[in-house]
Amino acid sequence: MLVDVKVPELSESVAEATLVTWHKKAGEKVERSENLIDIETDKVVMELPAPNAGVLKVIHKQDGATVVSGEVIAVIDTEASADESKEDTEDIKPITDVHLKSSPMSADKDIAAKNESHAGSTLMPAARRLIDENNMKSSEVANIKGSGLGGRILKEDVQAALTSKTGNIVENAPQSASQPEEKLQSSAQQPMQSFNQSSTSRKDRRVPMSRLRQTIAQRLVESQSTAAILTTFNEVNMQAVIDLRTRYKVPFEKEHGVKLGFMSFFVKAVVAALKKYPIINASVEGTDIVYHDYYDIGIAVSSPRGLVVPVIRNADQLTLAGIEKQISDFANRAQEGKLTLEELSGGTFSITNGGVFGSMLSTPIINPPQSAILGIHATKDRPVVENGQIVIRPMNYLALSYDHRIIDGRDAVLSLVAMKEALEYPVSPLLES
């Protein structure tokens, strides 16, 4: 029986996804629930498990392809053996393949580089891009021998063909076609050109943005262009928090099974300030201001794919231990790429911590549709004045960026002062239930 492998249902906010890496090849045996391929959306990378055991009969969509919910990307034969399937799949091409047909009407730069395959060999996406970028002729493409499975032409095959043709190592980007070669080879530039030709270490690498990075870029530009962002600063003496943490970290970890960090104190301080100044927790929808009577706090977490912001729901109802457990869980699963779309959606306010990387000060950008974000930084011993005396205290600079369209400077400054006071006079973990 043939079973279709389909893209799982994506969330309403995700229109499409990208196939990242197939872990199986056509003709190979697969087990039920075994991960076949990683699928990247603009928020997470998901694993797609095999719906049935059998043999991967054909792959319709290759690495790098853009797909939508429910789209068929492969077929599993539940009754075939791996050996039989390998023979059967040699002549199977992806459903997107288009075969090159030479024509007397073709120009030197014909459609060969834009087709999915040629002369019965499938062009992989990266190879096709490199052919397009270097304006290769159909006759040149036809002579490329594919080293991939089933004769598939890989990027490395195209690079080898270009290197053989020009004598220069080719990465991705060609010389701009708008600059004639004779102009670049003027007598005034000959010495420098000779030096560059002899230096094989000077190479450029062109790497496509991941879908997550594209989304981050789009949202940051959107935030800067649609909100009136202003940042206010303050400093906080972290001595009281440090003393509490030092005193209770051992019994806290024994009782709750999680370390007592600093971020839970910042979350508590933020919630206290948002309750006093609800406008900081609000958002803009058209000409309306939407006040949120709940406190969903996004915590920026670094992951191998970039910065992600999982959300602690109803943070006002959690103890320090409850907050620390969620943050620890988010951090671990962010490294493994296992955060869900739901965990990365929503949020009424965000916290970003550049201090873990050593940042002293920054102006964080608001995460739309939120109206404010708190940036915290590295805690350092600094000289401050107390009662007319210069003393050394562990100081942290706080930065609150806010949307001036709905938040006045007064509320922004006072809310940051409220956060400062909550951190300088924190509640003992022993007083929480």
Image (cartoon, grey):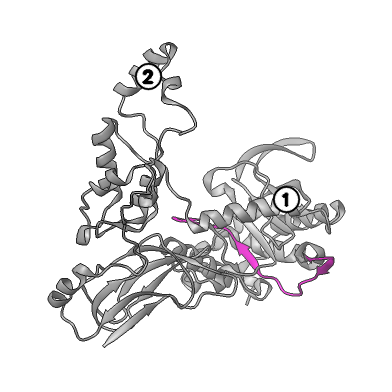
For the C terminus, the quadrant is bottom right
**Amino acid at dot 1:** Ser
Q: Nearer the viewer, mark 1 or mark 2?
A: 2
Residue 5, how many percent across, how many down?
36, 78
- Establish if 360 lies above or below 226: above
Label drawn at residue 193: 2
Kind of residue indicated by mark 2: Gln
Query: Can you identify the residue that label 1 sits on?
Result: 225
Q: Secondary structure at mark 2?
A: helix
Q: Secondary structure at mark 1?
A: helix
Range of magenta residues: 285-306
Asked where in the image residue 160 lies, by quadrant, the reply is top left
Please tell me whether residue 287 belongs to the stretch shown in magenta.
yes
Q: In the image, is residue 420 part of the stretch drawn in magenta?
A: no
Q: Which callout, 1 or 2, points at the residue further toward the start of the chain?
A: 2
List x then y, in percent, for residue 392.
65, 38
What residue is drawn where x is 71% and y is 55%?
424
